[in-house]
Image: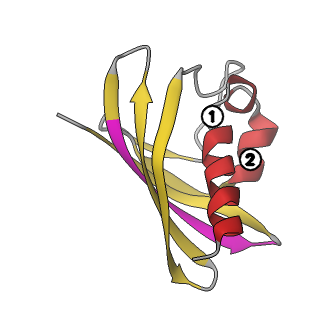
Amino acid sequence: MDRSLKAHLQHLEEQLLKPEIRSSREALQRILAEDFFEFGSSGRVLYKNEPIGEEGIGEVQMQLRDFEIQELADDVVLATYRIFNVTQQQQTLRSSIWKFKDARWQLVFHQGTKCI
């Protein structure tokens, strides 16, 4: 496994937890692929083209751990990890599919599943 790729994708996932990224339409547009969609832990399905308000996608206080990647193709990677939502005291399992396109890694799909 390419350690630098793992570190880069973990960095991108951690960026998506930061308030300054979550509140920036421009930053989100750069990270999310044009055809991005998400199955949220809330049960909602979200798409990149949905309107993002001035507040962005909401502030969160989350801790990421147990980050792993699996290369599915030369330009496609599955990332899996756990998130602890400090505010809600809730653990979730997370998975993301990243694709290398236009000279950068872009998030194509994301899913969060609450742990019981």
Residue extending farthest top: 87
The residue carrying pointer 2 sits among few (fewer than 14), some (14 to 19) or many (20 or more) residues within 10 Å by Cα, namely few
Nearest the camera: 63 or 55? 63
Instruction: Determine whether 51 is above or below 111 in the image.
Output: above
User: Is 9 left or right of 90, judged from the image as shown?
Assistant: right
Instruction: Tell me what residue is drawn at x 81 percent, y 39 percent.
Output: 26
**Residue occupied by mark 2:** 29
Quadrant holding the N terminus: bottom right
Q: Is residue 86 left or right of residue 101?
A: left
Label 2 amino acid? Gln
Q: Is residue 33 visible?
A: no
Residue 44 pos. (x, y %): 35, 38
Type of the residue with mark 1: Pro
Q: Secondary structure at mark 2?
A: helix
**Residue occupying the far bottom of the picture:** 74
Tell me, yes or no, if residue 66 can be seen here.
yes
The reply to whether the C-beta atoms of the residues labelled 2 and 1 are less than 8 Å apart is no
Residue 51's tag is 1
